[in-house]
Image: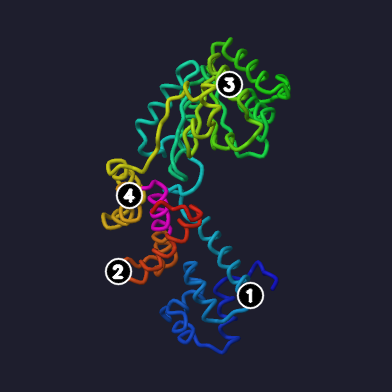
């Protein structure tokens, strides 16, 4: 079915319901929702959760084509509503927007900034997936650019990029980040070109710093051999500061090469884990005030943010984002979007939270 620009989720749901000869009450009973909910959806006053959309699809026994069309309309309406909301408070699964948005990690922040100020100071951030390693590298990059001025030249690259599969390609990316263009330093010469650039930068009294996210990728590619790691270590002795992020330690990534090249010996390792209670409370207090959350709503962040004996930053961000979205929709156009006294609301909230979290963690969720 061709999607019309003027079509809406509510209007389409009404067509499908009437085509099957169902009343709003009958559809509501089949889907397990309140009849008023169906009425509000069809009037365009309420956009249901994704889990409720699937219940409606099943209750209507839609064909695959009809179901896909209804899902597309729901997603389009969701994006339109989100564009009308206010500026974000929570930042779930997006790049670090500003240094001040990095909560906790005080020790790691100090280590990164202090070693960045050292000639050839190198830091390795190690931790599980989605624990905040990339945000820490971004924090360093943004702080250096904002506060350190012309004393530093900093670059940021992701080792997972297709253009970083060989030593020559890595060099081209690194030079582009630190210099702007690899052409004048003949990136095809590999790390010799990076050496030349580092010498040029340091001769001007500047400190070059290269942030490398996903450093573990280098350990899975034959192109990065003993010579590569040995030469890279030597370049750090000329003044190049490295800040890396990876799931495993440099010794585990480099293997036997590490012992021979000595690369990991020039690094200070920062092992990243879950938030402590104090870090979580700082986040909840600050973000709760910014979002206008009540004490009960702040408890929602505590409950969903907990991960074992600590708090997982990504879970805190997700819980806050979902809760604030519902509150904003309830305040602006749909009172039914936030029903804190209704147990069914929290069942829907739980389903949406777990679905979003599992999808991001790809089955590797620690909690």
Q: Which residue in the structure is indicated by mark 4?
A: 288
Disc 2 to disc 3, how far (Cα)?
Answer: 62 Å
Instruction: Please say which color scheme the image uses.
Output: rainbow
Disc 1 is placed on an element classified as helix
171 lies left or right of 32: right
Q: Earlier in the sequence, mark 2 or mark 3?
A: 3
Near mark 2 (Cα within 10 A), the count class, few <14, some 14-19 or many ≥20, is few
Say which residue appears at 57% left-offset and 17% top-offset.
234
Q: Earlier in the sequence, mark 2 or mark 4?
A: 4
- State yes or no: residue 323 in magenta: yes
- Residue 280: % across, % down: 31, 45
Q: Which residue in the structure is indicated by mark 2?
A: 341
Magenta region, mostly helix, strand or loop? helix
Disc 3 is placed on an element classified as helix
Disc 4 to disc 3, how far (Cα)?
Answer: 48 Å
The foreground one among 112 and 263 is 263
- Residue 20: % across, % down: 58, 87
What is the magenta range? 312-325
Q: Which residue in the structure is indicated by mark 1?
A: 64
- Comparing marks 1 and 3, which lies closer to the viewer? 3
- State yes or no: residue 193 in magenta: no
Q: Quadrant of residue 183?
A: top right
Near mark 4 (Cα within 10 A), the count class, few <14, some 14-19 or many ≥20, is many
Say which residue appears at 50% left-offset and 87% top-offset.
23
Question: Is residue 96 placed above or below 365 in the rendered structure?
Answer: above
The foreground one among 217 and 280 is 217
User: Which disc number belongs to residue 230?
Assistant: 3
The foreground one among 328 and 71 is 71
Q: Earlier in the sequence, mark 4 or mark 3?
A: 3
């Amino acid at each position: 079915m061709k999607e019309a620009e003027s079509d809406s989720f509510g209007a389409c749901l009404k067509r499908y319901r009437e085509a099957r000869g169902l009343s709003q009450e009958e559809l509501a009973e089949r889907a397990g929702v309140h009849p008023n909910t169906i009425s509000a959806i069809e009037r365009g006053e309420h956009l249901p959760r994704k889990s409720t959309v699937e219940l409606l699809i099943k209750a209507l026994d839609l064909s695959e084509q009809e179901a896909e069309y209804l899902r597309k309309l729901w997603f389009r309406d969701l994006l339109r509503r989100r564009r009308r909301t206010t500026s974000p408070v929570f930042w779930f699964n997006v790049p670090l927007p500003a240094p001040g948005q990095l909560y906790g990690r005080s020790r790691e922040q100090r280590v990164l900034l202090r070693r960045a100020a050292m000639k050839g100071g190198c830091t390795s951030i190690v931790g599980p997936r989605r624990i905040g390693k990339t945000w820490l590298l971004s924090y360093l990059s943004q702080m250096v650019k904002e506060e350190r001025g012309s004393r530093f030249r900093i670059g940021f690259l992701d080792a997972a990029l297709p253009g970083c599969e060989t030593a020559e390609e890595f060099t081209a990316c690194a030079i582009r980040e630190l210099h702007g263009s690899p052409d004048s330093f003949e990136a095809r010469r590999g790390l010799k070109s990076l050496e030349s650039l580092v010498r040029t930068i340091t001769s001007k009294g500047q400190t070059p710093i290269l942030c490398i996210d996903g450093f573990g990728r280098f350990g899975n590619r034959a192109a990065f051999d003993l010579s590569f790691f040995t030469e890279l270590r030597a370049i750090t002795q000329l003044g190049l500061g490295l800040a890396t992020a990876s799931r495993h330690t440099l010794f585990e990534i480099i293997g036997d090469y590490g012992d021979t090249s000595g690369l990991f010996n020039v690094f200070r390792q920062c092992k990243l884990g879950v938030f402590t209670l104090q870090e979580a409370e700082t986040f909840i207090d600050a973000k709760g005030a910014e979002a206008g959350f009540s004490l009960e709503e702040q408890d929602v962040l505590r409950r969903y943010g907990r991960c074992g004996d600590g708090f997982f930053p990504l879970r805190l961000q997700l819980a806050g984002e979902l809760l604030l979205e519902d509150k904003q929709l309830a305040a602006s156009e749909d009172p039914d979007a936030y029903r804190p006294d209704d147990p069914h609301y929290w069942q829907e909230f739980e389903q949406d939270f777990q679905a979003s979290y599992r999808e991001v963690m790809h089955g590797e969720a620690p909690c």
